[in-house]
Amino acid sequence: MTYIGRRELLAGAAGAVAVAAGAGGAQAVPAGGRGPARPGGGGGGGAAVREFRGMWIATVTNLDWPSASGLTAREQRAQLTALLDTAVRRRLNAVVLQVRPAADSFWPSAREPWSQWLTGTQGKDPGWDPLGTAVTEAHARGLELHAWFNPYRVANHTDPSRLAASHPARRNPDWVVPYGGKLYYNPGLPQVRTFVQEAMLDAVSRYPVDGVHWDDYFYPYPVEGEYFDDDDAYAEYGGSFGTRAAWRRHNTDTLVSEMAQRLRQVRPAARFGVSPFAVWRNRDTDPMGSPTRAGVQTYDDLYADTRKWVTEGWLDYIVPQAYWHIGHPQADYADIVPWWARTVAGTGVDLYVGEALYRCDAESSTPAWRDPAELSKHLTFAKRYAEVRGHVYFSAKQVVADPNGAMARVVADHYQSVAAPR
């Protein structure tokens, strides 16, 4: 049994991540003194509850928006506002817009080139300000706008000459590591961590975004037969660590904790969230882990100690990508959600569950995903846990198309009332 996660959809990963064992593959309290969580909402039938109802809008490879590279500014703007209007019709109250998919930008950045997914040519001005427009239009509709950044991905290829001439990766080739057919910034270099924070904070300082959002990419997902060559960085900076794995986790921890601190200084009202692969560690690896048998564990394979980020209070919210059905034999939604609820309990970090709307398909090979009620069952199950404060759906084009009616069922069963305005 294999799990095809959104990372494959977003970045064209070569293989699936297996979840079979041994395969390759309470009341929420604001965190860190950031002020109260602002998403509002009314639950279906009954007293209003504060909840987060979001959808991801992916821009890498034109997955959700724009529908193709090279559209006119007018066409791009019309498609964007249509997605925001869909969010309102589905009674959502937030969108998570990918604005730095691959060391590029959807705003006139002071540090990185315009994204190729706008015009087809990296560095070419699209003739408008997508992020600025998105913030204004989302707020006009009572929607939160969370800016979604990918910290380390540089390109979905390994040829630096294909990058814009001004690209920081070309000016600093020692920052870049080719791996698995892609280019990444090296997380082990302090100057890289500083730069990627500044690149993201450039947007945060200029636009009243409601949140900064990262997905599941830190160190890249393992690729069989490939070696992530950070030897020089490890030799220079890893001497005080017992293992390379410990040093890598420290590097990722440092990125998260520093970004949390800097965000609070630059835009205190903005919230900081991460949407990781949902398995921190399996219980057979660590007694504190989840009762799963996933082939990937964020702690061990991505060097991302997602549990620590919660317990340390570095995040305001976490959105584990719980992209399995109820009853999955190796990674059961009904096991993963309770584990995360226990993990966030008492920390002040809000738990929103990432939902695999993209898997809801009448032609799915998995019977559960052919059932239009499967996703609604997820929300019904999650309501048992007070720590679950909302759900986020991947991704926007499925929110629009709703191929087997699963989203309409969620709205009918759980979002009977309109989400409260911001």
Image: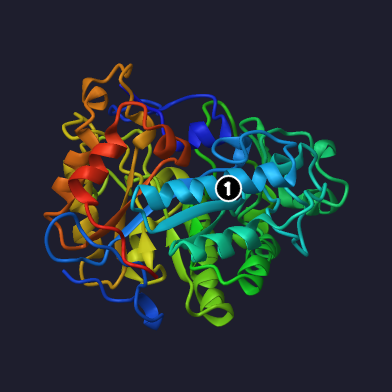
Tally of numbered tags: 1
How dense is the environment of label 1, judged by Cα within 10 Å: few (below 14), some, or many (20 and up)? many
**Residue 95 in the image, given as x and y percentages of width and height:** 46, 54
**Residue 348 in the image, given as x and y percentages of width and height:** 28, 73
The quadrant of the rendering that contains the C terminus is bottom left
The residue under label 1 is which amino acid type?
Answer: Leu
Q: Is residue 192 visible?
A: yes
58 shown above or below 341: above
Q: Is residue 299 visible?
A: no
Residue furthest out toward the right: 165
Q: Residue at x 19, y 33 (%)?
A: 373
* In the foreground, 183 or 149: 149
Return the residue at label 1: 80
Q: Residue at x 39, y 64 (%)?
A: 309
**Residue 80 in the image, given as x and y percentages of width and height:** 58, 47
* In the foreground, 41 or 212: 41
**Residue 278 in the image, given as x and y percentages of width and height:** 33, 46
